[in-house]
Image (cartoon, rainbow, N blue to C red):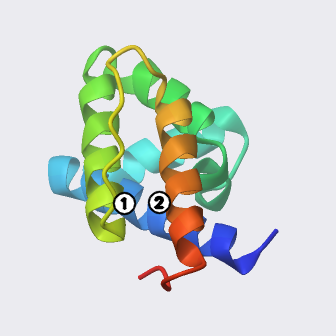
Amino acid sequence: MSSSSDDFDDLLLDSIEETLQLLFGKGATFIIENIEKNSGVGSRELSKKPALLSNGLERIMGRAARNIERLIVKDITSKLGVDVPHSETESFADVVATVKARALQGKSRDEMP
């Protein structure tokens, strides 16, 4: 795994944690721990497997999960300074993969934050 990919995963994890903390305060820890327990992976792996995060959020939050995912995408694209148009029907994992590809393309010219 390249350090560029690891940098992106770290930034995504930050965006996940920050978004959940902004929305739920201390409850964010419960949400993340619940998703980790039910998916069998740690938070570091959730940033590498966004479909697991999406499934966990949907299980806990129901339809509100899509709004939370949009906020996570908005946060990471803002941090990276990239614009990634996507449709409402695209899965969170697909959008994250597109953001990651766009960010890693730009990595050859600039360092990621």
What x and y, as percent, mark residue 93?
55, 34
Residue visible at 45% across and 21% down?
90
What x and y, as percent, mark residue 86?
36, 30
Residue 15: mark: 1
- The residue closer to the viewer here, 2 or 61, is 2
| Secondary structure under the numbered disc 2 in the rendered image | helix
> Relative to residue 85, is residue 60 depicted above or below?
above
- Quadrant of the rendered image containing residue 38: top right
> Relative to residue 21, is residue 55 depicted above or below?
above
| Gap between marks 1 and 2 measured at Cα | 5 Å
Q: Residues within 10 Å of mark 2 (few under 14, many from 20)?
A: many
Q: Is residue 36 left or right of residue 3?
A: left
Residue 12: mark: 2
- The residue closer to the viewer here, 47 or 20, is 47
Q: Quadrant of the C terminus?
A: bottom left
> Relative to residue 14, is residue 27 depicted above or below?
above
What x and y, as percent, mark residue 72?
32, 48
Q: Are marks 1 and 2 in contact (CB under 8 Å)?
A: yes
| Residue 83 in view of the camera | yes
| Secondary structure under the numbered disc 1 in the rendered image | helix
Instruction: Tell me the amino acid under the disc marked 2.
Output: Leu
